Each structure stands twice: as structure tokens, then as C-alpha cells.
Image: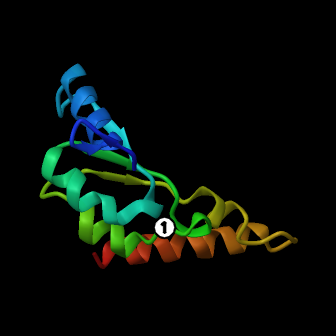
Amino acid sequence: MQPHDGEKLYESVLRKASQWGTTENLMFVIGATQSDWFSRIGQSQPDHFYLIPGLGAQGGSLKEISEKALIKDGGLLVNSSRAIIYAGSGEDFAEKARESASAYASEMSGL
């Protein structure tokens, strides 16, 4: 969040990194817990693909990320590992993991 040459440092990094490739061969990793950043990121990098970790256990919201980061052709690959693999800790582990993954799939299909 530090200022750098009149913009936030992460914006400077994204701008510079976007020069290393194209929207066809370059994606950015941006955490779901910072969904408010996507309004600014989308202005400077509107057509790039994003890998978004941090849903669920880390506090990121699929709904918020989708509202702020989804572009016309999709452009999002979300990750919710811990919320799924730690959904259950006993003999019901597989069932709880399936339920958690199914809930995310259902939420995504409604977006």
C-alpha cells in the first residue's frame, strides 16, 4: 500500500509486470482478501487473467471478488483449498470436503 511514483506500489508492480507479456501469456496473482483493490486493478489491467487465492478460510468472498474482478470472458481462477480440505477432520472428512466444494460450485454457477 506504500506510495511509489504517484501510485500504490502494487500498481507500479502490475504496470511493470504487464510489460513482460500479454494478456494471452501472463496472469496476476491477487489475494481474495483484498477485493477492494480490484476496482483500481481493473482500471489499469482490465483484460488480464487473475489467479485468486484466499477464499473461505482466509476470509475472501467469492461474491465480492466476482462483483469487482470478473471480466467479460471470465478471467478468474479462484482457489479455496483450506476451506475444502479442512472442512472435516474426522471420518466424515471426504463428505465434508465434498459438501464444501459443492457449495462453492453452486455459488459460482449463480454468479
Q: How many marks?
A: 1
Picture colour scheme: rainbow
Image quadrant assignment for residue 78 = bottom left
Can you name the residue that lies furthest to the right here?
90
- What residue is shown at x 45% (from left), y 53% (from top)? 31
Q: Can residue 7 be seen in this view?
A: yes
Image quadrant assignment for residue 6 = top left
Q: List x then y, in percent, for residue 22.
A: 17, 27
Q: Which amino acid does label 1 sit on?
A: Gly
Q: List x then y, in percent, for residue 21.
A: 21, 23
Position of 109 compared to 79: left or right? left
Q: Nearer the viewer, residue 34 or 101?
A: 34
- What residue is shown at x 31% (from left), y 53% (from top)? 76
Q: Quadrant of the C terminus?
A: bottom left
Badge 1 element: loop
* Mark 1 lies on residue: 60
Q: Which of 77 and 65 is in front in this view?
A: 65
Q: Which of 105 and 62 is in front in this view?
A: 62
Q: In this view, does 101 lie above or below 17?
A: below
Crowding at dot 1, Cα within 10 Å, few <14 / some 14-19 / many 20+, comes out as: many
- What residue is shown at x 87% (from left), y 71% (from top)? 90
Q: List x then y, in percent, for residue 37.
A: 31, 59
Q: In this view, does 101 lie above or below 81?
A: below
Q: Can residue 46 be seen in this view?
A: no
Position of 12 compared to 45: left or right? right
Can you name the residue that lies furthest to the top here?
20
